[in-house]
């Protein structure tokens, strides 16, 4: 710690702090334009100049100057005020003054500082900028006439996002911030630059002219998309979410968001939302009262009893999951499951068998301190972009060595010094086994407390680096080097995402990742961790609350098979469009057709809802109170920001009413429900809502120690013998099927595509935009071609989100699909 004096006030701060950070901690205001707490010090704007006694009175930038013992700082004198005012005058020489029509009006840092320092005239003259406005993309508007060259957009895109869209070009008065070759912005549209811009140079187009900032009501909640659990501050007006506000003070994401979190909110306001219950009469779905709909459901499920089933998505709150479980009990069935019933088995079976737990062992902030990171599957950034930004910061700031095991290239593989273990589809486990083999052979294993080591070593005899290299196409030396880096790293992180398009080998990958984490001592070690991250916003909550089949009961696959055979009399589907997103559409379709009575509870009249006998209109995350638990076990609170459209109700209220119909009592409020669920949920026993503050509450502490340390050998995959193999997964811009109703993501990727590597495209004479057809055993799909450099020869890719593609007619959960290609 360092002692210094700021404006006569004694201050004690960390020796790594700057003068600005020390002053802020002491409650002393210093103006800034180019500073942001998540960016490295820069010192571009010179507005933060202060005087340091030991530096003979000269003015220095407080945001870049580190504190020293005994330093005496003065933050305001007549001279400092004069210099700051002069800096502002220089900034305004070429700056166009469009405050009345600028969307930044009312929260513009330059506007506020000009007012504070009384810049009512300018002693300097110069020609105002007249640069063209970049409105090429649908989400971000760039007006460089308003730019103050703080460089925050350049830095956040490089330091945090790792994309590098912006840079400074030209010199002197001609300096400006531009994209490559000064073209229109074309990036991943996360909007980080929007959140960083202190003026109106970079603005969110969907919010343009919607409201002034002081007209908005701000409500903190949790993003309803992926398991990262990012805090979002909803800016609401007229009972609609108008925008997502920047907030780096609350939550684990430090204000970072991806395109879905920042621009994917509009589905909440959609005029296509369900607003009234629907009941099938004479073959058609017609509007009905809640009383009639609930009575029909109660009657049918009471009659069905144990021959009924419940299938849920993973975007319900913990409190809603709690009531859903109670509802299944009230009906008399243990047939309860979520998210397709397979993708999460890496947690519920893989980690359970090895570590004795069903959750990630560390928190996201610890990932930024890692020295070595292993990402299993290239798609980890696509499924969890904000955690991907944490990885980028670890690589750039902590010089972490990143290794990616994947069947294609991607965002992670383009990070500095990243090593890609590029394998043939479906052979991830083989590569992990080879890494484990090296650790065992070279004596790099941390053996303390390990059980089953000898048996495990024998089982891995055939997975030498050379043998696996021959089978998978991965370089043997790269496998060896990866093993050594993971073993010698002080802090190591292993990352694996799971979700509906990644159902294949879910348990096997969980086992393999857990084995590796045990061998290098990452599981349960401070600063290290094994992260299994769910696709949906409350995937971890669904595991914690045990939204799973009871012993001897049916999971999703068994329920669908039973229903297809006419053995299931009633089926209740909550927040899942199974006909679009579940593998094996033919079976899902048959199950829905053969089930005697089907209820669908959702926001939209989805393809699955169109098959239902009763459809119930549900509420979005923006209309709910309750809690989510993210992939690092952080319990966070949702707060309702708007009311639901029409007669739509929260899932909590719907389950309450149904429990009442079955003569069961239900918690009166979400608060009461949390108290009850905490009492009977492992890890939640000592948690109360009062403990869940702005940063949430991590159950099990920041480091979750394994309860067991069992090595469980897992067999690797086998190569598919096919000229072309199709793999599927998530696209960066979408999450499940919900984002298909959001204008932001749809403005960037509005239709399905089939992606080709350049080598295959050239051989097949396929060019970008061509309509191509893929034939497989289960049928065929048709879509426009996308040509890129990330796919190896013989591998094609198609995202699973789009109903119009019908991918699940040929995808039934396998690692890869043999296809024939034609135009």
Image (spheres, grey):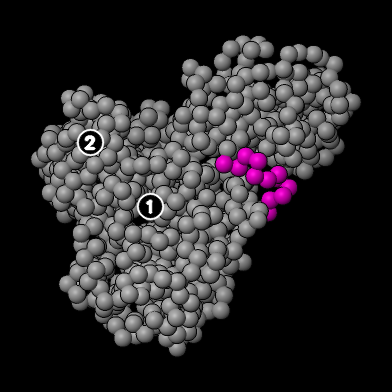
Question: Which image quadrant for residue 410?
Answer: top left
Residue matched to label 1:
736
Task: Specify the farthest residue to the front.
Answer: 282
Gap between marks 1 and 2, in whole Å?
24 Å
Q: Give neighbour class at mark 2: few <14, some 14-19, many 20+ (Cα, 10 Å).
A: some
Above/below status of 202 relative to 701:
above
- Closer to the N terminus: mark 1 or mark 2? 1
Q: What residue is drawn where x is 38% and y is 34%?
A: 411
Query: In this view of the protein, can residue 410 be seen by the observer?
Result: yes
The region drawn magenta spans 206-217
Q: Where does residue 569 sit, x and y in percent of width and height?
A: 26, 78
Q: Give neighbour class at mark 1: few <14, some 14-19, many 20+ (Cα, 10 Å).
A: many
Task: Specify the farthest residue to the right.
Answer: 78
Residue matched to label 2:
772
Q: What residue is drawn where x is 31% and y is 71%?
A: 283
Q: What residue is drawn where x is 43% and y is 78%?
A: 293
Residue 782 shown left or right of residue 634 in the figure: left
Q: Residue 313 lies in magenta, yes or no?
A: no
């Amino acid at each position: 710690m360092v002692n210094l004096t700021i404006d006569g006030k004694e201050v004690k701060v960390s020796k790594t702090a700057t003068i600005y950070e020390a002053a802020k901690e002491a409650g002393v205001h210093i103006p800034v334009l180019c500073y942001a707490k998540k960016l490295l010090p820069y010192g571009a704007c010179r507005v933060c100049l202060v005087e340091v006694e030991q530096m003979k009175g000269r003015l220095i930038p407080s945001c870049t100057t580190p504190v020293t013992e005994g330093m005496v700082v003065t933050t305001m004198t007549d001279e400092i005020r004069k210099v700051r005012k002069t800096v502002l005058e220089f900034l305004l020489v070429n700056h166009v003054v469009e405050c009345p029509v600028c969307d930044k009006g009312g929260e513009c840092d330059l506007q506020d500082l000009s007012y504070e320092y009384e810049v009512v005239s300018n002693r300097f003259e110069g020609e105002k900028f007249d640069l063209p406005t970049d409105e090429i993309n649908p989400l971000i508007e760039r007006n460089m006439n308003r730019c103050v060259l703080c460089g925050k957009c350049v830095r956040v895109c490089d330091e945090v996002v790792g994309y590098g869209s912006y840079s400074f070009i030209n010199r002197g008065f001609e300096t400006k911030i531009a994209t490559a070759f000064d073209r229109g912005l074309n990036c991943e549209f996360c909007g980080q630059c929007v959140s960083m811009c202190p003026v109106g140079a970079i603005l969110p187009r969907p919010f343009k002219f919607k409201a002034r900032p002081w007209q908005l009501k701000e409500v903190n909640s949790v993003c309803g998309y992926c398991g990262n659990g990012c805090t979002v501050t909803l800016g609401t007006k007229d009972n609609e979410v108008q925008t997502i506000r920047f907030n780096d003070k609350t939550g684990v994401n430090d204000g970072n968001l991806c395109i879905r979190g920042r621009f994917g909110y509009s589905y909440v306001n959609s005029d296509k939302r369900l607003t009234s219950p629907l009941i099938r009469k004479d073959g058609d779905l017609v509007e009905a009262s809640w009383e009639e709909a609930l009575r029909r459901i109660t009657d049918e499920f009471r009659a069905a009893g144990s021959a009924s089933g419940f299938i849920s998505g993973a975007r319900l709150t913990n409190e809603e999951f709690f009531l859903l479980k109670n509802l299944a009990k009230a009906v008399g069935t243990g047939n309860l499951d979520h998210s397709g019933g397979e993708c999460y088995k890496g947690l519920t079976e893989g980690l359970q068998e090895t570590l004795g737990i069903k959750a990630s062992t560390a928190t996201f902030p610890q990932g930024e301190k890692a020295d070595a990171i292993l990402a299993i599957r290239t798609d980890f950034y696509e499924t969890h972009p904000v955690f991907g930004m944490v990885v980028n910061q670890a690589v750039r700031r902590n010089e972490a060595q990143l290794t990616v095991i994947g069947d294609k290239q991607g965002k992670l593989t383009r990070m500095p010094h990243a090593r890609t273990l590029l394998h043939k589809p479906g052979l991830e486990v083989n590569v992990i086994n080879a890494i484990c083999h090296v650790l065992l052979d070279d004596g790099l294993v941390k053996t303390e407390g390990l059980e089953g080591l000898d048996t495990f070593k024998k089982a891995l005899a055939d997975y030498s680096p050379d043998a696996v290299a021959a089978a998978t196409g991965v370089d043997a030396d790269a496998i060896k080097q990866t093993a050594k880096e993971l073993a010698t790293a002080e802090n190591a992180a292993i990352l694996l995402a799971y979700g509906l398009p990644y159902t294949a080998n879910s348990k096997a990958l969980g086992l393999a990742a857990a084995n590796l984490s045990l061998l290098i001592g990452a599981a349960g070690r401070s600063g290290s961790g094994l992260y299994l991250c769910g696709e949906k916003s409350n995937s971890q909550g669904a595991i914690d609350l045990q939204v799973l089949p009871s012993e001897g009961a049916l999971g999703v696959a068994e329920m669908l098979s039973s229903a297809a055979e006419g053995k299931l009399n009633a089926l209740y589907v909550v927040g899942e469009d199974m006909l679009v997103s579940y593998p094996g559409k033919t079976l899902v379709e048959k199950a829905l057709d053969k089930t005697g009575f089907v209820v669908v509870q959702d926001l939209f009249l989805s393809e699955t809802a169109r098959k239902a006998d009763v459809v119930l209109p549900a509420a979005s995350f923006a209309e709910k109170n309750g809690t989510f638990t993210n992939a690092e076990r952080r319990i966070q609170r949702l707060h309702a920001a708007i009311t639901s459209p029409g007669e739509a109700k929260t899932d909590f209220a719907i389950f309450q009413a149904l429990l009442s119909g079955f003569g069961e009592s239900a918690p009166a409020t979400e608060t009461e429900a949390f108290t009850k669920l905490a009492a009977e949920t492992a890890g939640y026993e000592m948690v109360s809502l009062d403990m869940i503050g702005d940063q949430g509450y991590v159950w099990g502490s920041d480091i979750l120690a394994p309860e067991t340390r069992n090595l469980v050998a897992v067999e690797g995959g086998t190569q598919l013998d096919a000229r072309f193999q199709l793999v599927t997964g998530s696209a960066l811009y979408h999450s499940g099927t919900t984002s298909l109703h959001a204008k932001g993501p749809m403005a960037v990727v509005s239709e399905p595509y089939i992606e080709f590597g350049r080598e295959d495209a050239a051989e097949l004479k396929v060019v970008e935009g061509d309509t191509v057809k893929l034939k497989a055993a289960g049928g065929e799909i048709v879509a426009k071609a996308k040509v890129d450099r990330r796919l190896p020869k013989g591998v094609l890719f198609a995202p699973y989100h789009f109903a119009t593609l019908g991918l699940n007619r040929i995808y039934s959960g396998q690692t890869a699909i043999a296809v024939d290609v034609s135009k």
